[in-house]
C-alpha cells in the first residue's frame, strides 16, 4: 500500500536535490483518479507536482514509463512553441518522468493559475479561445512523426462491446439502460463508416474536457493533463471539447459550438460538417465505456459523461439537423 505522506516527503527531498528548490508548503489537490497532485510553494515560486500512482500507471514497466515520458516531452514541446500549457521540468539528463530513490514516479511543472470551468457552462468567448488553442495545438502536433495508431473506427468491435453491455444490463434488470443500449446498437448499425475515410490521422490530446482546462477572465489560461496523448483522429478533441463546454441537459448550444469552430479554423483546417462526424466518432469510443451498468449507478464525473452519451443516443437521428452545418 502506498503511504501518500511518505511519498510527498520523498518527492520534496528529490525536488530539492534535483531542481534546487526548497518546498515551503504543500497543498493537496482533489483531482484525478488514483493520482495525487499537489500545489507546492517553493523558494522559487509555485509548482505543480503529479505523483503517478503505481496501481494506475505502472511506470515500473519500461514501455508504460516511455509512453508517459513521450507525452510530457510533447507537452513541453507545445509549451516552447507558444501553446497555453504548463512548462514541464526536465532533469539534468533531459528526463521528464522523475523517480525517487524508492521508485516513486512524478512530474513537476509550472503552476498555471486559472479556474476550472463548469461542464456545459463555458461562454461563447471562452469556447472561441479554446477553439483557437485547440487548433493551434493540432497544427503544431501535425509536424510530430506519427507513432502507431491507437484506435480506428470498428463497427463490429463497437457492436460487440455494446451487446455485452446490454446483456449485463439485462442481468441487472436495469430497464432504462436496456432501452438506451438497444438504441445505441441501432445507431451504430445504421452509421455509414465510410464517412471516416476523410478524417485526418494525427496526434491529439484525447482528454480535452472541462477538468483539464484552466480559464482566466478573457480566455484559456492553459490546457493540462496530456497523459492520454496518442495518435488517432484529432477531431476527437473537437467533439470532446464541444460536448464538455457547450452541452447542457437540453442539448448543445449551437452558437457556442460555432464559436469553438470559428476559433479552431483560425489555426487548423476543419471542413463544414466536421463536428457531426467528430461527435459520431467520439460516440463509438465513449458509448461502450459510459453506457455500462456499473457507470449507470455512479454519480459525479461519470454521471456527466453518461448524461452526454444518453443525450447523443436518444437524439442520434436529429443531431445531423442540429450541427451538421457547422
Image: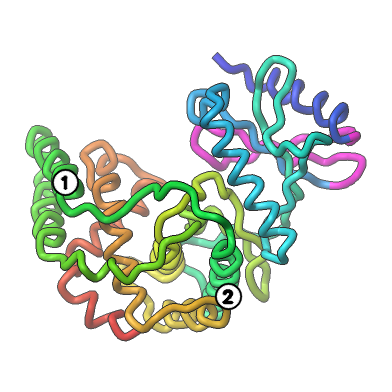
User: Which percent across, then down, holds residue 21?
Assistant: 89, 36
Place residue 273 in its image quadrant: bottom left
Instruction: Give x and y (percent) for residue 34.
Output: 51, 31
Q: Which mark is residue 132?
A: 2
On the picture, is 107 further left or further right than 122?
A: right
Residue lying at the far front of the rendered structure: 145
Q: From the viewer's perspective, is residue 97 above or below residue 8?
A: below
Majority secondary structure of magenta residues: strand
Which residue is found at the position 35% from the left and 53% from the top? 305
Work out which quarter of the rendered image holds the N terminus and state it.
Answer: top right
Tag on residue 320? none
Residue range in magenta is 20-45
Q: Is residue 278 above or below residue 44?
A: below
Residue 179 colored in magenta in the image: no
Assess disc 2: are there few (<14), some (14-19) or many (≥20) residues with their C-alpha within 10 Å of its C-alpha. Answer: many
Name the residue that disc number 1 marks. 162
Between 35 and 139, the one nearer to me in the picture: 139
> Would residue 243 be visible to someone looking at this image?
no
Q: Position of residue 148 (x, y in %)?
A: 43, 47
From the top left corner, tell me how far across and down residue 20 is, in percent: 91, 34
- Residue at the location (58% across, 65% down)? 137
| Image quarter (top left, top right, bottom left or bottom right) of the C terminus | bottom left
Secondary structure of the residue carrying tag 1 is helix
Residue 304 horizontal side relative to residue 186, left or right: right
Amino acid at each position: 500500500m502506498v503511504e501518500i505522506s511518505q511519498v510527498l516527503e520523498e518527492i520534496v527531498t528529490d525536488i530539492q536535490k534535483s531542481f534546487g528548490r526548497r518546498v515551503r508548503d504543500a497543498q493537496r489537490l482533489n483531482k484525478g483518479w488514483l493520482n495525487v497532485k499537489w500545489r507546492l510553494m517553493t523558494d522559487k515560486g509555485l509548482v505543480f507536482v503529479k505523483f503517478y500512482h503505481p496501481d494506475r500507471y505502472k511506470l515500473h514497466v519500461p514501455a508504460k514509463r516511455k509512453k508517459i515520458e513521450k507525452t510530457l516531452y510533447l507537452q513541453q514541446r507545445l509549451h516552447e512553441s507558444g501553446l497555453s500549457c504548463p512548462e514541464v521540468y526536465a532533469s539534468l539528463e533531459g528526463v521528464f518522468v522523475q523517480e525517487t530513490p524508492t521508485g516513486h514516479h512524478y512530474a513537476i511543472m509550472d503552476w498555471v493559475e486559472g479556474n476550472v470551468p463548469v461542464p456545459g457552462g463555458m461562454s461563447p468567448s471562452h469556447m472561441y479561445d479554446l477553439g483557437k488553442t485547440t487548433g493551434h495545438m493540432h497544427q503544431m502536433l501535425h509536424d510530430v512523426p506519427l507513432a502507431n495508431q491507437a484506435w480506428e473506427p470498428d463497427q463490429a468491435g463497437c457492436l460487440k462491446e455494446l451487446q455485452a453491455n446490454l446483456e449485463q444490463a439485462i442481468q441487472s434488470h436495469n430497464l432504462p439502460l436496456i432501452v438506451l443500449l438497444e438504441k445505441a446498437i441501432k445507431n451504430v448499425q445504421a452509421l455509414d463508416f465510410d464517412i471516416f475515410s476523410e478524417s485526418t490521422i494525427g496526434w491529439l490530446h484525447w482528454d480535452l474536457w472541462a477538468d483539464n482546462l484552466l480559464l482566466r477572465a478573457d480566455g484559456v489560461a492553459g490546457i493540462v493533463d496530456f497523459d492520454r496523448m496518442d495518435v488517432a483522429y484529432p477531431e476527437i478533441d473537437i467533439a470532446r471539447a464541444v460536448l464538455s463546454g457547450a452541452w447542457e441537459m437540453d442539448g448543445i448550444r449551437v452558437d457556442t459550438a460555432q464559436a469553438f469552430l470559428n476559433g479552431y479554423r483560425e489555426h487548423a483546417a476543419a471542413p463544414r460538417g466536421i463536428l457531426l462526424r467528430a461527435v459520431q466518432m467520439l460516440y463509438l469510443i465513449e458509448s461502450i465505456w459510459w453506457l455500462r451498468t456499473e457507470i449507470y449507478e455512479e454519480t459525479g464525473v461519470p454521471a456527466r459523461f453518461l448524461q452526454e452519451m444518453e443525450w447523443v443516443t436518444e437524439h442520434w437521428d436529429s443531431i445531423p439537423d442540429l450541427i451538421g452545418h457547422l
